[in-house]
Amino acid sequence: MKLVVFGAGKIGRSFIGQLFSRSGYEVVFIDKDRRLINAINEKRTYKVIVCDDNPEMIMVENVRGVDVDDTVQVIDEIASADLMAISIGKNGLSEIIPLVAKGFLKREKDHPGKALDLILAENLRNANAFFYNALSKVLPLDYPLKERIGLVETSIGKMVPLVDHQGEDDLLSVSAESYNTLIVDKNGFKNPVPEITGLEAKENMKAWVDRKLFIHNFGHAAVAYYGYLLHPECVFIWEVLEDTAVKQFAKEAMSQSAVVLQHLYPGIFTDAHIEDHINDLLRRFANRRLGDTVFRVGCDLYRKLSPDDRIVVPLLSAFHLGLPYDKMIQVLSAALCFKATGPDNKMLLSDIDFHHVLAEKGKKAVIEDVCGFTNIESLRDCGFYQAKISTGLWNFS
């Protein structure tokens, strides 16, 4: 059995490739990094270094690579694949969609009527709709996309360090936490769900995708923004979580967001499941070996405060459902104060622009323009304009 993976990055190697290789698949990575592809083809194996309380090293074998610019071979690999996955990040998807479509067309020519499942290993809400629309634009009108291609959404919860320290002499090794569960949409498959250790197929996938957004992504942001607010001198996420005030606030904010999730998807997540998940996430966030930084988790404010991302979605959902959201407001309030710098002691360029706009137009304009609140006046009496946090009162007017 052969898995073709677009993207030989950290998630592609430490998670997708590792899971399927260990379950007996040949894993073919397609990537634009020629050095990486050449190294994969030279060694045909690589190491995953588990950064956790019980460190271990996993050898991933039976792998090879294809340069994405070798379009003829890429198309052939897709045509003969037993399964596909994409893990390159939203920004790179538009570049590879036409190539993927050509592979589908050759597959239909070589193997008429043979379905192929595509695992969408992207942190992208409504990923199946995104891919369907993108593929529809480049495939012929008579190509039976719905019948031939299974668009399988995932929830990617695995965390990897921002920077590996293996060095130039060990280009392929990748570090990651021990968490190794790949949640997939059971209903997205056209073929039987593959028997892969660590793969969990769920019926109501939208609920699990939103669990990642409402609790994992939101909670990570809460730690970064509130942690920076109280401890702007701290570099690492584990550092700010050593302050019990930060940890307790993050837990309360995550719990508040989780209540919204439970109301949106009744009967899917029990209270015990939610509590265990939040506690496990806070433990994982505090993993020193990951070396995750406050800067990485909190930067890119335009994206992370956008209407379809980790703070605004649960906040507005709570408002519309009539549920408490005071903690979520405090996370948003703290985000507007976020000015953490990276290893070069500089803020992300887009975040510099964000704060220029904030200074020029004011918080109200930013919340309307960036976060997408179209009826902000109606929220005044609900406490939106004034979010009280431990360091003071932030006025949104």
Image (spheres, helix red, strand yellow):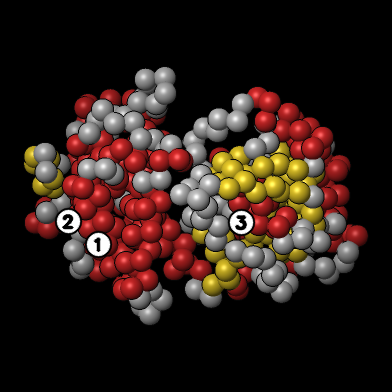
Q: Could you say whether the residue bearing mark 1 is in a helix, strand or loop?
A: helix
Query: Would you say the residues marked 3 and 2 are in contact, meaning their CB atoms lie under 8 Å apart?
Result: no
Query: Would you say the residues marked 2 and 1 are in contact, meaning their CB atoms lie under 8 Å apart?
Result: yes
Q: Could you say whether the residue bearing mark 2 is in a helix, strand or loop?
A: helix
Query: Residue at the spot x=34%, y=40% of the render?
Result: 237
Q: Which circle, 1 or 3, is nearer the viewer?
A: 1
Q: Which residue is mark 2?
A: 326
Frontmost residue, 56 versus 222? 56
* Residue 393: % across, % down: 8, 41
* Residue 221: % across, % down: 33, 46
Q: Which residue is at the far right?
A: 110
Instruction: Measure the alpha-carbon separation of dots 3 and 2.
Output: 34 Å
Instruction: Measure the alpha-carbon separation of dots 2 and 1.
Output: 9 Å
Disc 2 marks a residue whose amino acid type is Asp
Query: Residue at the spot x=9%, y=56% of the render?
Result: 381
Q: Could you say whether the residue bearing mark 3 is in a helix, strand or loop?
A: strand
Q: Is residue 303 left or right of residue 161?
A: left
Q: Which residue is mark 3?
A: 120
| N-terminal-most mark, 1 or 3 | 3
Instruction: Measure the alpha-carbon separation of dots 1 and 3.
Output: 29 Å
How many other residues sit within 10 Å of disc 1, few (<14), some (14-19) or many (≥20)?
many
> What is the tally of numbered marks visible in this picture?
3
Frontmost residue, 396 versus 197? 197
| N-terminal-most mark, 2 or 1 | 1
